[in-house]
Every structure is written in C-alpha cells, then in structure tokens.
Image: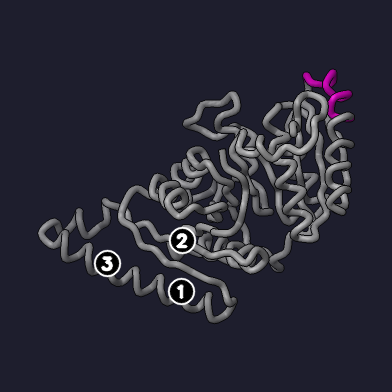
Amino acid sequence: MITFNADKILIPIDFSETAKRALKHGISLAKLFNSEIILLHVQKKTDLVEVVFPAMKIEGTLMIQDFLEGKMEKISQQIRDEHGVKVTPKVVIGNITSTITEMAEENKVGLIVMGTHGSDSTSDFFLGSNSYRVLTNSDIPVMTVRHEVSELQYKNILLPIDTSEHSRQKVNSAIKLAEKLGAKLHILGLLGSFEENYEYKMKVIIPQIKKLAAKKHVMCTSEIDKDANRVERTLEYAEEVNADLIIIMSDQKAGFSELILGSYAHQLINRSAAPVLSFPPEILSELMEEPVIGGMWSK
C-alpha cells in the first residue's frame, strides 16, 4: 500500500499543446514540492517507419530514437535553466499506457501529471484509450489537465464527498495538499436522488473533515447537495468556488469494473476546466488519523 508524495513527478509528453499544458502544471508542482521530474516520451512499437519501411526497421527506429532523445534533452535543459528543477528525460519504445505505469513504478514516482483532451479528443495519445487506462491501472495519484489556465495556482481545492466508503480515503491527502499550497478547501457533500436518508451521515462526516482541516490551519467551506446528477453539480460548484483543483477517487476498484473508470470520475475528468487529481481507492487507509463514524479513519 502506497502513500501520496510528490518527490518524483512523472510527466508523459507527446509534444502536443495538451502535453505542454500538463507540463506547466507538473513544473509548478515540482517547484512547490522541490520534486524531480521524470519526463517521458513513449515511442509506439507500431511506429510508421516500421510499417512503411520494414527493410529500414532497425536503422529507422534508431534514428527516431536519437532524434527524440535529443529533443527531450533540449526540453529538459530548458526547464532546468528556467525553473531550477531537476529533470530526467526518458524515451522508451513500447505500449503507451503500460509503459507509463511501469516507468512510474520503476522510478518510485509519487504523482503522474498528464494531459487529456476529454470527450472531444482526436489525439491518439490522450484519447480515453490511453489516459483513462493509465488512471485505471495506476496505483498512484494521477493529475489530468485539459485546459490552459491564465495563472498556475491552487488556492481553491474542491473536495467532493459521497456516501461510498472509499470517497473519504482522499481526505487526509487533500488536507495536506491544501496546507502545503496555502489553499482553501471546499467540501461538497453529494447525495443522489435516492440517498436522502444518508443526509444525517453527511452532516456528521463533513464537520469531522473540517475539524481535521482546522488542526492543519486549513480554511474550509462546505455544502451538502441533493442532486441526481453529481457530475453537473460538481462542475457547477467548481465554478462557484473558483476551484483551481478538484480531488476525487478514480473509482476503478470500488464496485466498478477494473477495466473502466467509474462513470463519475470519467465524466468529470472529461469535462472539468480545472485539473483533476484522482486517487486510486484504498491507497490512503494507512494514513487515516482518527476514528470516526463508519470507520473513516483508524489510528
């Protein structure tokens, strides 16, 4: 079982505009947490030169590898010079999604930051078949970035909480991030159309979260919402509080097929203007600090 840390940040790039947006966020976080960046480009096995020019397969692949390594080193040096961040570039031939998760594990990475075009994607790299598979298979947190932002800051963090047990596993890390970033935490209690009877539970849970936040001197706001469409309400609330970051659970092992993301996580990542930080379920149980109702935390 692993814990969240940002000592090493893996940023997969394909040189697209979306990748550049993710890179900006990754650099910003690396500066805040004094992290090392692992800059990764995955060259697909089915590269064009292998398909069109099979006789030149080895030579062509090596030429492409050399070119990409040079390009990655140039980008890395620019980051070092401009931001004073340690950067290790890597070019690997393989399957995109499995290579990203394998490289994260091999390099003991604590966070993956990657771009996604969302539901309107036409990019092979960032289409759901890749970015969402990384989320589904990753045992560490993944931040997905869709849009360019005018200012890189994380002053308002939105923390949606629902009635599922795993939903609260992200709480401690959210508080620690808010403390580190000097951010305000906005807790949104989400109740579905058939969950009115759980309102009393939410009214117990949220004050407990706020109490934990207060111990770390993190300011909090909260609201409980009874809305059948949780995604729509989360997006609306994100606009209301000017959220710079949304922290959710990726849901892939919490009652859903491990082959797909949960519907809430999938739709939110597709549509959110703010970056979304997704935690895989159960990774934070060892960090729970205080016993509260429903076994939310245990010492």
Identified at 73% across, 39% down, the residue is 232
Question: Are circles 2 and 1 on residues that touch, CB within 8 Å?
Answer: yes
Q: Amino acid at mark 3?
A: Ile
Q: Residue at x 22, y 66 (%)?
A: 62
**Upstream in the sequence, badge 1 or badge 3?**
3
State the residue position of label 3.
Answer: 64
Sooner in the amino-acid sequence: mark 3 or mark 2: 2
Q: CA distance from mark 2 to mark 1?
A: 11 Å
Number of residues whose C-alpha sits closer than 10 Å to that of mark 3, classed few (under 14), some (14–19) or many (20 or more): some
Within 10 angstroms of label 2, few (less than 14), some, or many (20 or more) residues? many
Which of the 4 quarters of the picture holds residue 146? Answer: bottom right
Residue holding disc 1:
75
Q: Amino acid at mark 2?
A: Ile
Mark 1 residue element: helix
Magenta extent: 194-203
On the question of residue 124 being in view, the answer is: no
Q: Secondary structure at mark 2?
A: loop
Q: Earlier in the sequence, mark 2 or mark 1?
A: 2
Quarter of the image that includes the N terminus: top right
94 displayed left or right of 196: left
Q: Which residue is mark 2?
A: 13
